[in-house]
Amino acid sequence: MAGNVLYIPYSIIMILVVIMLIVFTSLTKRTKTTKYIIAISLPILIVFQFYFWNLEFNDFAKSFVFPSKEFRCEYEHELKDLSIPLPERTVLKGREDVCSPFYSTFVNEDEFRSFYQEELLTMKNKGEIVKYKYLERNDVDGDGNKGFLVELASGSKVDIVIHKREDSNKWLISINSISK
């Protein structure tokens, strides 16, 4: 399934460009050039199509090339001036313009816990947050969610939770504001 609707026209345009390249070079009777263009363009086309249509590979590539560095929310008053850092190789899974709290990451539980213990301690020392605590709880499904409950100076709380995604080796991070 496509990660973005625009991947459909991108794919069609890329395939048409490769076909036009092959036709153009084959009409010029340069078989050596045609072979080189096919040898270069087809693997590139395949990698891009794999990126467009395989969400696991899409997340994997984005985690290296375009990782999300921090959670910022301009639309909620309590979170307006707060910037919550994210672990390395974390990818936004929602929309950027609406305070999406959903992220996919390739770090495990232990790395998540040590990362946020360090970052939240730094934020507490800077006065950005009042306090935080580590929580482990079970859902109605029996799945264990682990994370941190962070209290802001305004009295509001932010829940930073990690849980294992069933169908892959990735972890999902959700950041939710809990009003006072």
Image: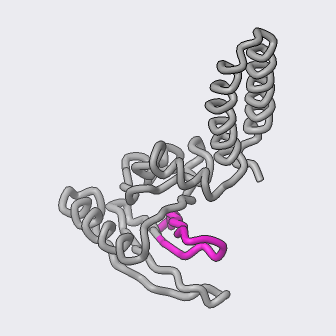
Side of 152 where 55 appears, left or right: right
Q: 69 or 174, which lies in front?
A: 69
Q: Main secondary structure of the magenta part?
A: strand
Which residue is located at x 67 percent, y 87 percent? 141
- Residue 168: horizontal and vertical position, in percent? 61, 71
Describe the colour scheme in one phrase: one colour
Instruction: Tell me how many marks there are.
Output: 0
Which residue is located at x 79 percent, y 37 percent? 8
Which residue is located at x 43 percent, y 65 percent? 156
- Residue 9: horizontal and vertical position, in percent? 79, 31
The quadrant holding residue 16 is: top right
Residue 171, relative to residue 70: is it above or below?
A: below
Q: 51 or 111, which lies in front?
A: 51
Which residue is located at x 69 percent, y 29 percent? 38
Residue 71, relative to residue 129: is it above or below?
A: above
- Residue 126: horizontal and vertical position, in percent? 20, 56
The quadrant holding residue 41 is: top right
Side of 28 where 166 appears, left or right: left
Residue lying farthest to the top in this orientation:
28
The boundaries of the magenta stretch are: 161-180
